[in-house]
Amino acid sequence: MDISIIVPLYNEEESLPHLAEWIDRVMNQHHFDYEVIMVDDGSKDKSWSVVESLRASNPRYKGVKFRRNYGKSAALNVGFTHAQGDVVVTMDADLQDSPDEVPELYRMIMEEGYDLVSGWKKKRYDSKIAKNIPSKFFNWTTRKMSGIKLHDFNCGLKAYRHDVVKSIEVYGEMHRYIPVIAKWAGFSNIGEKVVQHRKREFGVTKFGMNRFVNGYLDLMSIMFMSKFGKQPMHVFGLWGSVSFLFGFGIVVVLVFRKALGLMNLSSSVLLPLAIFLATMGMMLFLAGFLGELICRNSPTRNEYLIEKVEL
């Protein structure tokens, strides 16, 4: 199979028929063997009924329905699991991503040898204050921290070599950083393509301002795990040791001065500080890394309540 198109969706009943017609037209024009996997992230409208009707009229369409809303990362991760195409393309369901971009994305993967090609919505039709300016700052920060020279990390329109989606795992809200996760997994040939951004025709955006706060927390988590996930003591052991030794050193000095009769320990503010630093040094590992490590290695972090499957 040439292409798998994964469409995560949430309350998009109006846009889905138009998107499906558009995808079919482009795929047939270029004679692609394809499948479309629509992942309903717990929609409250009639989106799943639309997916079922698309499946009934065209067996190339497949669907997965979550019992409740888990988020875009969960939807993408499930789509990656079921994808069979040599090239896997992800796009949003709101018609703001153009299926006309898919043939060129496919060519860049198959002929130019990219592992991943990310869309760049160079000209956007979103609110400048609510989305454009925060997005530019977010992308600039991610470029500096990851070393990946992309302008739009969060663009929903991306293409992947089959091996990439089978080698990475997306959970929480990590979908914004799939290029970073792919690079961490060893897929460093990452490209970019300017793509068309369209105005939303139906419904309203599903993302609020909290995504920027959560986005930076996720970025710090990914960067930490990529650098220290296999060697956590390189960071926690270092600073824990520094804190412990500093506190222990203060205790030694205080005891020595007490032995010489130069001070009264009961009235010294340095003793509680020394105890605090020594304790923090011993507890730093537990306070910081274990929480993230346990979450990352939890066997249930990517288990979702799936209500229906049409494959």
Image (spheres, grey):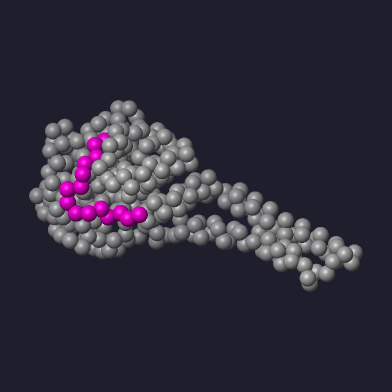
| 132 displayed left or right of 245 | left
Extreme residue in the left direction: 57
Asked whether residue 77 appears in the rendered view, the answer is: no
Residue in the picture at 13% in, 46% down: 18
| 17 displayed left or right of 224 | left
Quadrant containing the N terminus is top left
Give the extent of the magenta segment. 195-209
The picture places residue 149, in percent across and down from the top left corner, at 41, 34
Residue in the picture at 72% in, 59% down: 247
Asked whether residue 300 appears in the rendered view, the answer is: yes
Residue in the picture at 54% in, 56% down: 289
Extreme residue in the front direction: 129
- Residue 33 is a magenta residue: no
The picture places residue 70, in percent across and down from the top left corner, at 32, 59
Extreme residue in the right direction: 260
Residue in the picture at 34% in, 33% down: 192
The picture places residue 139, in percent across and down from the top left corner, at 40, 42
Q: Is residue 56 above or below residue 34?
A: below
The picture places residue 14, in percent across and down from the top left corner, at 14, 53
- Image-quadrant location for residue 51: bottom left
Pick the front one: 173 or 1: 173
Extreme residue in the bottom direction: 266
- Residue 198 is a magenta residue: yes
